[in-house]
Image (cartoon, coloured by chain):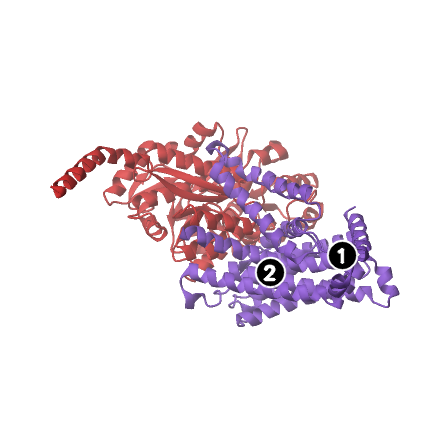
Chain colours: A red, B purple
Amino acid sequence: MKNGLKSAFYGIALAACLPAAPALAQDCTVKIGAVLPTSVDWGRPIAETAQFAVDLFNEAGGVKGCQIDMVLRDTQVDPKVGVDAAKALVDLEKVPVLLGAVSSGVSMPILTSVTVPSKVMQMSCCSSSTAFTGVAADGKTDGLWFRTFATTRNQSAVAAKLVQERGYESVAIFYKNDDWGQDIGRLVQADLEALGINVTASVAITDGQASYRAEVTEALKTQPQAVYMALYPAEGTLVAREWISLGGSQKMVVANSLKSDEFRDNVGLQYLGDVVGHDSAQPRTESAAGFVDLYKAKFKSEPNGPGLPNSFDATMIALLAMEAADEAAGPAIAKAIPRVTDPEGEKIFPNAEGLKKAKEVLGAGGSVSYQGGTGPVTFDANGDVSAPAVAWGFSEEGTKEVTYYTLDEVNAFIETLN
Amino acid sequence: MIGLVSYLVFFFTITTILAIAVLGLNLQWGHTGIFNGGVVAFFGTGAYAVILLGGPERAGEFGGFDLIWPLAMLGGMIAAGLLALIVGLATTRLRHDYLAIATFGVAIAVETVARNAEYWTGGAKGLRGFQRPLEAAIGDPFLYNLGFLSVVILCLVLVFIALERLVRSPFGRLLRAVREDETAARALGKSPSRVRLQSFVIGAVIMGLSGGLYATFYAYIGPQDLAPILTFQIWAMLIVGGAGNNRGAVLGTLVVWGGWVGSGWALTAFAPQSMQLYAGTLQYILIGLIIVGTLMLRPRGLLPEILTVSARAAQGATPSESRPAMRTGQTTKGEKVT
C-alpha cells in the first residue's frame, strides 16, 4: 500500500515534470567569461562586438537550447586586475571559456596562472605577440589557447608584399613601442631585407607624447622612398602629420590598426592618397551575409576600429565550439574547435540561418567551416590563425579595398620569405 | 563553494604579496619620511631578476641560469637593494617632493629599459617564468595555490616581525628622529643621510621580495606590470591603512585591493545588463570613492601610528610626559601633508 502510494506519487511528479522539461531547457543559461579593457576608448567597441555576437547566438537559440550570459569584466590594461578578474570568472562564475584579453601583457599571465591550471579555454581576439606561439610550441598551453588575430608573422609578410608590389626601394619603419609593435617592426624589417629592400631606419614610437618631431626627423634624415607605420590612430596621426609637414614621402604602407576614420579625418584625406594598408580579409564569397552587414545593421556605422571582426569571430567560434562539445568543460570545448573550423566542413555564415544550420550539422555530429569577419578561420597547432589578406586605402566614405590575397597566396608568399 | 575558496586563496595571495611591498614603503615613508615615488622600480627589479636567475634558457637572450628558487629570490632581493643603493647615493641630498620626482624618474627609466632592452629583459613581450617551484610535484592547482599562499604568508609574517622589531629598536627610534627633525638628529651626532640610505635600501629589498613573489606566482613579468599605477596603488594602501603603523599597512592593502577588485565584481553582479559595458569606467569612480571616503573618515589612516618615544619610556611614562611627543608628532605630520 505504502509502496503503491509512493509510486503513484512519483508517477504524478514525473508527469508534472515532463511537460515542464522543454521549458526548463529554454530557461537555462550558460555563462562565458570576458576580460576586456572596457574602460579604454578602443576597448569598449571590442567588448560591444563580443556582446553583439552573443546576442546573435542567443537569437538563434543559444548553446544547446540554453541562453548565453556573457559575464564581462574590465582589465584596466593592468595585469593584476585582469588576472584577478579572470580568476573570479573562472572560480566564482564557473565559466568554461574565457574571451580575452586584448593586451598580450595581460593575456599571458591569465594564460599561465589562471586558464591553463584551471583547464579553461582561452580565446583572445587581439593578442598578437609571437610569445604565445612559443608557449604553445613548448606544450604549456595544453591546447587551451586560441586567438583570432592573425599572428604578426602573417601581417608582416603582407606588409612586405605591399612594399614590393609598389616598387619602393627604401623604407623607414615607425612602430608602436609595445609588444605588438616591436614584433611587427622587427618582422617587417626582416621580411623587407629578405626581399632586398633597404630599411633605412626603424624607429620606436612610445605613445602618449605631445610630439614626435625627434623620431620623425631621425627617420627623415635617411631619405626613404616610402614609410611603413605600425601605429595606433592617436600617435599615428601625430607622426603622419609631422612626417608630411616636414616633407616626408606620402607613400605610406600602414598596419590594420590605422584603418580608422579618426586617423583619416585628423590627418586629412588629401594627404593619404598613396596610403595602402594591410589587414586580414573578409571571406570572398557571399560575404554580404558576413560580419560587416551585421555590424552595420546593429551599430549604424562601419566596423572601423582595431580588433572588431576578430572579437566577433573569437566569440562566435567559442560559442559554436560549446555547441559542438559534448560537455561544458574547457578541454572538451577546445577539442571541438577543429569541428567548427574544418575547411572541409559545411560553410557557415554567422547570421541567423547560418547559425541554425551550424547547430543542425554539429548536432548530427558533422563539422562546419566558420566564415567570419576575418575570413574562413583555421587554427594551427599553436592556436594561431592564418588568414587571407586585403590591401586597403582611404576613401571619402571610409576605407576601400585595393587588392585581395587568398589564404593560399599569403601562405605561398610567406614560404618564399622563410 | 570550492570555487569561492579557490578564488579567495588567489585573492589573498596577491593581497599578501602587495602587503609585503606596502610594508617596505612603510619603513621608508612611515618610519623614515623618505618619499619614494618609484616603488615599482624596486618591485620590478626584484621581479625581473628572479625570473632571469631562475628561468629557463631563452633563445638568443640573456638569462636562463636555472637557479633554484630560493637562490633566485635572494638574487632578486639583492638586485633591488643594489638599485636602491645606487639611487640612494645619487639622491642623498634630495628631500620630500624632490626625492619623489627623482625616484619617479627612476621608475620610468626602469620601465623603459624593461620595454626596450630586448636582450636583457625580453622587451615588450616580457619574460615568461619558469615552472613554478614544486608545481609538478603537487599537481593539483588548488592545492598548489594553497601551498603558495602559505609561503607568501610566511614571508609576510617574517617581514612583519622583523620590521616590528626594527622600528621598536634604538635604530627605529633613530629613523623617527630623522623623520621628525634631521637637524636635531645631526646635533645628537647621528648621520641622517646614512640612516636614510639604510632605511631606503632595506625598504627596497622588501619591495624586491614582493616583486619576486609576484613574478613567481604569475610565472610571467612584463613591462605592463611596471606601470606607474602600481606605485600609486601601493601608496594608496599605505595612506589608507595608516603610515607609520605596520598593522595599518597590511590592513590598508586588504581594504584598497579588496575595494579595487571587489568593485569590479560588484558591478558585474549588480549593475543592470545595459550598464555592463560601462562598468569598467564606473569601477574607477568606485575605487576613488573608497579611497577618498576612507581618508575623510579616518584622515590618519585606518590604524594611525602610535607615537611613543620608546617601548620602555611608554611603560614608565605618566600621561603628562607622553603628551608632548604626541603633539610634535601631529604637527610634523601636518607639515608633510602640505
Q: Earlier in the sequence, mark 2 or mark 1?
A: 1
Which amino acid does the dot numbered 2 rest on?
Answer: Gly
Which amino acid does the dot numbered 1 rest on?
Answer: Gly
Q: Tell me whether circle 2 and circle 1 mark residues in contact (CB < 8 Å).
A: no
**In the depicted view, which residue is nearer to us: A116 or B161?**
B161
Q: Identify the image quadrant of residue B312.
A: bottom right
Q: In this image, B181 relative to A96: left or right?
A: right
Q: Residue at x 74, y 56 (%)?
A: B307
**In the depicted view, which residue is nearer to us: A216 or A60?**
A60
Q: Residues within 10 Å of mark 2 (few under 14, many from 20)?
A: many
Q: Residue furthest right?
A: B187
**In the depicted view, which residue is nearer to us: B109 or B333?**
B333
**In the depicted view, which residue is nearer to us: A241 or B1?**
B1
Q: Nearer the viewer, mark 2 or mark 1?
A: 1
Please report, as a chain letter, where disc 1 is located.
Answer: B
Disc 2: which residue? B211
For residue B161, above or below residue A277: below
Coordinates of residue A117 in the picture (x, y in percent) = 42, 57
Which secondary structure, mark 2?
helix
Residue A123 visible? The answer is no
Q: Identify the image quadrant of residue A312.
A: top left
Q: Identify the image quadrant of residue B325.
A: bottom right
Q: Residues within 10 Å of mark 1 (few under 14, many from 20)?
A: many
Q: Are marks 2 and 1 on the same chain?
A: yes
Coordinates of residue B223 in the picture (x, y in percent) = 60, 55
Coordinates of residue B303 in the picture (x, y in percent) = 66, 51
Residue B310: give its label: none
Disc 1: which residue? B33
Which secondary structure, mark 1?
loop
Residue A211 visible? The answer is yes
Coordinates of residue A55 in the picture (x, y in percent) = 40, 34
In three-dimensional space, the C-alpha distance between marks 2 and 1, rounded to whole angstroms, equals 22 Å
